[in-house]
Amino acid sequence: MLVPLSWMLSFAPLPTDVDLLRATFDDLGLVVESVEHIGEGLDQIVCAKVTDISAIDGADKVRKITVDAGGAPLTIVCGAWNFVVGDVVPLAPVGAVLPGDFVIAKRKMRGVESNGMLCSARELGLGGDHAGLMLLTTVEGATPGAAIADVLGITPDVIFELSAEGNRPDAWSILGVVRDLAARLGVPVTVPALTDASIATAAATSPAAASIAAPAFCQRLTVTAATGIVVTDSPRFIVDRLEACGMRAINNVVDASNYVMLELGQPTHAYDAHRLSGGTLGVRLAAPQETITTLDEVARVLGVPGRGLGDSGEDVVIVDGDDVVIGIAGVMGGAATEIHDGTTALVLEAASFSPMAIARTSKKLGLRSEASSRFERGVDPNLAGAATERFFQVLRLTCPLLAVGWPSAVAEGDVAPVTVITAPVGEFTRLLGLSLDAATVERLLAPLGFAVAGDAILSITVPSNRPDIRTMPFGVADVAEEIVRTYGYTKLERTFPSWSTPGSLSAAQRRRRNLRSVLCGLGLDEVWTPTLVDPAVAARGLGDEAVVRLTNPLSAEEGALRTSLLPQMLAAIAYNADRRQLETGFFELGTVFEHPAVAATPRTTKAGGGGGAVASLPMERTHLLATLGRHGDDAATAVAMFAELHPTLGLGPYRLVQPAPLTDLGPLGLGLHPTRSAAVVCVATGITYGVVGEVDPTVVALAGVHDGRRIGLLGLDVDALATGELARAVGEAIPVSKFPSSEIDLAFVLADATPADALRAALVAAAGEHLSSCVLFDVYRGTGVADGSRSLAFRLQFGALDRTLTDGDVGAWRTSCIDAAASLGAVLR
Amino acid sequence: MGVTVGTLDLDAYVGAADAAIRAASSTDALDAVAAEYLGKKSQLALVQRTFGSLSDEEKRTAGAALQQVRSTLDGAISGRREALAAAERLEQLEADRLDLTEVVPAQVRRPLRRGHQHLISQTQAELEDVFVGMGFTVADGPEVETDWYNFEALNIPPAHPARGMWDTFYLELGDPETVVLRTHTSPVQVHLMEEAVANNTLPIHAVMPGRCFRRDTPDARHLHTFHQIEGLVIDEGITFTDLAGVIQTFTTAYFGPAMSSRLRPAFFPFTEPSAEFEITCAICQGAGCRTCSQTGWIELGGCGMVDPAVLDAVGIDATRYSGFAFGFGIDRCAQMRYQIADMRALVENDLRFVEQF
């Protein structure tokens, strides 16, 4: 909202210190977005007539100009060439200050004295033209020495761009803003008449001219007939004020309506009386499929339920005496009854509509107007009378024969009762922390129009221009805000509450932090990839029914929720590869989504529409995924990395199951290399909670990584890590033996078809209780080992807490191990 | 009787080609077959070149017959190619087979390099730590919410004009516009309050970080996906001046002792009284500069006393309990601290950016 200082000053003797006003606005919650100074620095700029132009020796960019600026001829050195002798141009004489604090001084250039500066439009802050001097030759009154501000009719002013909050309908007008400022600054507010001329009274407007058939949607409808209208241009000051507020002048009738809306906040609508059947206005709900062509020449269909919640299709309309729709209430009038050049009589509507109804209709039709945005916030139901009077005052300036049909016809719907907030004064202290008494509350609220009565128990009557203040009990909070707002947020004390419970992270949050720090320690970079992905990508490997789609995506490529982290993480590798950054090892901890129709356990919560219904929502799971794309990375890297990560997870022993059982893995199993991946399974519980291995080469290529590298993969279902069964009981520390341990190395040749882990398990089982570790330390294929098998070398370490083991002990275990291995077909080398 | 074009018996040609296609045992061999029967030097192509001597009518008939042969063979070749490619892929995968339990971790070598946590998760952790130090617990919540949690319980009824404050992504679930990607972390407040009421565990002192979504076209300053952290205190005797104090404590703890905060009246449907909170402009240290529009203050987030309508919606007795809530952007904190000119760098995951943090 643009608010000119000059307009504000017509209502109250406000200070003109712009910084003070800006700070006050801010502290009142009327946020100043920008401040524009109009005509600043123009007071010393005069018109100058060019009397001579001559070259300066040795200068080809500047010339010596002689001008007549009302006094003695002045010489000026000037670099512009767009004028000739006889032209009139703006002169900033010595001592003038141009916008941007640029002081004009006497200077000598090329040996020629320059006594000022001839200016372009941009240099004067009067537009963007910088191609040459501003030419005033043809402007009326541009005589030498005349002040340019007078010649151009520019009055210096300051325009504040304010953003009034949604809960401040009262502040959506010049007068409303002034009222707020004046209350804080302690100055009186008056609304002077716009004209001394009297306005003739015509026959009273017929009481039947206003009727309301939808009382829940319109508190009051005020209709006033008038004759003696001449449609013409508005007076200059009206046009200036409208333009300063960013509105275009149309004609005196439309301008008067806009002027009143800007000034008082009451939208009005004028109908051509001769085109208004019956000369009456009624308010009702649109019938289903009823249509109207609005002022913008668009045919609108009304009375149809909207798509969203809470829009049952109740559109409020204005009808004429034949019950024909002639306007969408509070949003836009119809074309048929519009004011036109030949209008001589009009009917003025000033009403107060239900904010919610106007908001619904405006949203559904995609039609926002100055009027609808005010009605949406709530218009004072008692404002129509004053606004109607003001409208005719403005119109009287151009229509001397104006005759108004006083009194107006007024129809009433469900007029909201006056809101009274009753609360102990201590209630405000309880909420605000300010020490308040009745006198203080009254001092703070009375200037805003609140009537405060009572002492211990306050009874606060809310003015009708504050429909945002709710009734009891919630209204207490609204009044509390008004108290602290007028008190001044910047003056607010700061207190520090304390409580006895400690702050903490949850176990799940600590686990996520641990994962991040371990993986960073292992050299991986954390990435953040998009949640919104291409539906085709989301469906990959899962089918369309698993995909949650957006109703209103910004683009088709962002039309679904991700089902897996993998595609976007591979895309991150491709993005870097395209920039010759090939050493990429990434991980992400993020949410993936599963459609409730396919989720094993869909999430159900309270739905909309009052929270009564139940809705099925997508299953959200936190996945950890690492894509290992550095030089030499592959499935083995992933396995080794998981071996490092696992001890920090607080889980019991795991085993790798190959091939990974895809049905147990869900989205975590997407894109796995079929022969180089395994599922991570908890030995004790059999729960599958992760994958290690590689990304399927076809999937790598699909993501745009074409350099043939292998990409190792490590994935964890982070939510599963939190399940009670998986979490290991707090383990006891394993004592370390003081006696020397014994080690034996055993190498076996084993067919490729049998997993190394099977052999290791057999060795562990056979070695007995004194085995302290059994580690695979070498794998060999080649000469001396038959094709289709490999040599696996294990180091077994034995120890006892109470003695040194004998060669005999170890020898016996060795034999058992070899026997156990033989049963798997493994042959000792 | 088969169709003959020129010297070529088409049925015989197709029969021979079919057999060759079926016999091709690799994609390379199949390529050779395709060249032989459909290529530039194939009999089919040779016959086509003799069309010059035919009448228009004959050309049409012969042309159609040849086209028929071509499409039949094309189909057969692509079918065979798929089968062969699948077999070759299987063969390759089989040759690639690795027993993951024979990996010797000690033999896996990786360069000595630390990784980098994402700037946003670092920032989030720093913010969480500040609030944990101030006595807050940290809560999480889902990214998909119903209208109830994202709007209605927060005193934003359906079709309320205040909904225009959030550009919402809706999901194709349930009735139209009932399931949303959360536009703020505030729904977590509702979950926490409902749980506290159900389990009789009031008071609440918690912060809620998380990912949020708004339907804004991304530009240098905004992404449609962003991260917020939000705080909620519900207890007996909590006041607006307590909120001002907590905001100030946080400001100095996170941004540094030289930084201050101030509140300015604002409107949010879920708080009353409401405020924007601003902190000292870090660029000019409060002196006034272009970044802060000469005010010396930079807006960080919104806050206020929890609206009694919100307490009512979740069943908290507003005459006994009061509380405040505040929220601001995690991404914005990072942007301010590191002067990030284009927020899109946060999702590009370019190593040159990632490695800076």
Image (spheres, rainbow, N blue to C red):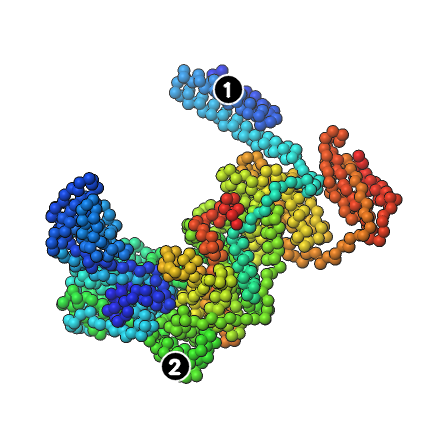
Question: Residue sitting at 18 percent across and 65 percent down?
Answer: A345
Q: Secondary structure at mark 1?
A: loop
Q: Nearer the viewer, mark 2 or mark 1?
A: 2
Q: Quadrant of residue A458?
A: bottom left
Q: Is residue A614 left or right of residue A55?
A: right
Q: Is residue B112 above or below residue B270?
A: above
Q: Amino acid at mark 1?
A: Ser
Identity of the residue drawn at 66% across and 40% down: B108
Q: Tell me where residue B343 appears, x and y as whole percent.
A: 45, 50
Is residue A271 in view from this perspective? Answer: no
How many angstroms separate mark 2 from mark 1 (CA)? 106 Å
Left/right of residue A810 with respect to residue A576 in the rendered view? right
Query: How far across and down, in percent of the image, does residue B123 sit?
Result: 52, 55
Tell me: B267 left or right of A409: right
Which residue is the site of mark 1? B42
- Residue A61 picture location, percent across and down: 21, 41
Density class for disc 2 (Cα within 10 Å; few <14, some 14-19, many ≥20) is few
Residue drawn at the location 67% of the way across and 55% of the way down: A650
Label 2 belongs to which residue? A439
Q: Amino acid at mark 2?
A: Ala
Residue name at image x 15 percent, y 47 percent = A65
The quarter of the displayed image where residue A693 is located? top right
Tell me: residue A596, above or below residue A4. above
Q: Position of residue B233 (x, y in %)?
A: 52, 68
Question: Can the viewer see residue A556?
Answer: yes
Report the front residue among A355 and B256. B256
Residue A364, numbered circle: none
* Image-quadrant location for residue A485: bottom left
Image position of A615 with respect to A426: above or below: above
